[in-house]
Image (cartoon, coloured by chain):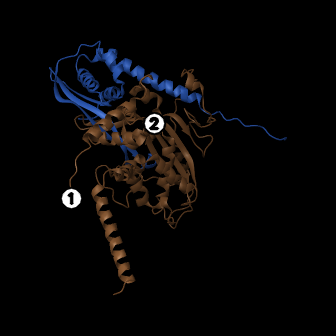
Amino acid sequence: MTDDPARKEWMGLLAKAKPDALEGLWTRQRAPRFTWLRAPEIGAAMVRGRIGGTGAPFNLGEMTVTRCSLQLDDGTVGHGYVQGRNKPHAERAALIDALMQTGAAEGIEADVLSPLRAQALARGKQRASKAAATKVEFFTLVRGED
Amino acid sequence: MYVAVKGGERAIDNAHAWLAEERRGDTAVPEMSVAQIREQLKLAVNRVMTEGSLYDPDLAALAIKQARGDLIEAIFLIRAYRTTLPRFGGTRPIKTAEMACIRRISATFKDAPGGQVLGPTFDYTHRLLDFKLAADGEVPPAPTTVPRQEPTPHITGFLNREGLIQQEPPSDETPPDLTRAPMELPGSRALRLQALARGDEGFVLGMAYSTQRGYARNHAFVGELRIGTVAVEMDIPELGFAIDIGEIEVTECETVNQFAGSKTEPPQFTRGYGLVFGQTERKAISMALVDRTLRWRELGEGNVGAPAQDEEFVLYHSDNIQATGFLEHIKLPHYVDFQSELELVRKLRRDASGAQEAAECPL
């Protein structure tokens, strides 16, 4: 399979979403019937950095991840990979991943993904705004006589 | 004769019951939630995640609560939990150049593009106890201003342009993992960085400080210190492409050190690198200093016999869980070991006094 930018984006958005935020947006949806291909399991991923930020990789430490895979009754397969240890969160992510490949995509995009994206953007912007307020403005004192 | 002794079961159970009660403290005082620890003791949480080597703020907060605030005990709990997790894979290296910075300072360039952004720092506070905090925790919202849109480039990038700083050779080699294979020394720089990242903050700080005081000449400037969030990307085999599997906060420190040059290298600056989970800047700076010091062989510098230059000494003593395990085991029952020592000392004394008596009363 080749890179799928749209799917990559929504899966990343779901992985990084706060479980409460996704739950709040998801409850208004009607969950479709599905069967598990891989029931939710909690595990770890080894996070890597690069020496000097640009050089060879090294192992920084692990992070918790929960994953699962499921199949809708129409055969569509959805995968969920989310940060943390929340199994219902991974299930929601996989269901959304599956639904986004069906005719329900437009509705899910509007009701779930789009508000989730807006929340993430707002959170990032708020932190960036506070950081910007702590930027040092240097000024030079004029000393002595010319 | 060896006599197996069992017992203490009831004493142990009662000790643990009392431990639980002591953990809770005075029940007239409201109990602290894990969320409160996660939000209000964030720097403790960061340390437990970094040295526990597992990024999960909720788990780290739980560990701190269970350990009654003993951070090494909390790190122990996280390390133990970590071993129960299946490994889904290794991530792609995080892109710290794309970090959403909340703090970014340089001690070397005042006017670096992106500016000096202080962020939520203790620097410049007067270190006076704030008794207002004992009364109420209400704080006014922090001021905001329009955020910059441009990226914040790495400071070492500017020096690279003039060729004044040593470059890090790019590679995509799978790094060694000391949690999977025993550490073999001398190790690669990647292995050293993994060990330092999870090493005890106090130990790494002490080692770094020793280099500043002259045990291995190592005059470092903080070229850049940045704190912020980065996306973590991993290849997913069932998809056939990589996705973001989360977002973590990290602290990155790059030091710039003088280097006189060698037969093959022109005089240039060299680098030390520190990278840790969360806002943990003392540790990140310490890590960068020790990393740079341990590079003496690669850079053709002399070994002056300083402790911080001794890779084996540093890497085998930086892990506080290994250290605690070995140190604290000596308080556990050693009745049989000690019995044999006791017998030995008694026998030596008997032999010595026998020999003396024999010397005093020759027949």
Quarter of the image with the N terminus of chain B in it? bottom left
Q: Quick one: which chain is blue?
A: A
Q: Name the side, left or right, on which B151 lies relative to B111.
A: left
Q: Quadrant of residue A106?
A: top left
Q: Are marks 2 and 1 in contact (CB under 8 Å)?
A: no
Q: From this view, report whether residue B61 is shown above or below residue B299.
A: above
Q: Residue at position x 48%, y 37% from top? A: B279
Tag shown at residue B44: 2
Q: How many marks overall?
A: 2
Q: Residue at position x 27%, y 58% from top? A: B336
Which amino acid does the dot numbered 2 rest on?
A: Ala
For residue B99, say whether it is visible.
Answer: no
| Palette colour of chain B | brown
The residue most toward the right is A145
Q: Nearer the viewer, residue B98 or B283?
A: B283
Q: Name the side, left or right, on which B106 lies relative to B324.
A: right
Quarter of the image with the C terminus of chain B in it? bottom left
**N-terminal label among 2 and 1:** 1
Q: Residue at position x 54%, y 26% from top? A: A130
Q: Residues within 10 Å of mark 2 (few under 14, many from 20)?
A: many
Q: Residue at position x 54%, y 25% from top? A: A129
Q: Position of residue B219 (x, y in %)?
A: 58, 55
Which residue position is annotated with label 1? B2
Q: Position of residue B66 (x, y in %)?
A: 36, 34
Q: Name the side, left or right, on which A52 lies relative to B178.
A: right
- Of tags 2 and 1, the one toward the viewer is 1
Which amino acid does the dot numbered 1 rest on?
A: Tyr
SS assignment at label 2: helix
Q: Residues within 10 Å of mark 1 (few under 14, many from 20)?
A: few
Q: CA distance from mark 2 to mark 1?
A: 46 Å
SS assignment at label 1: loop
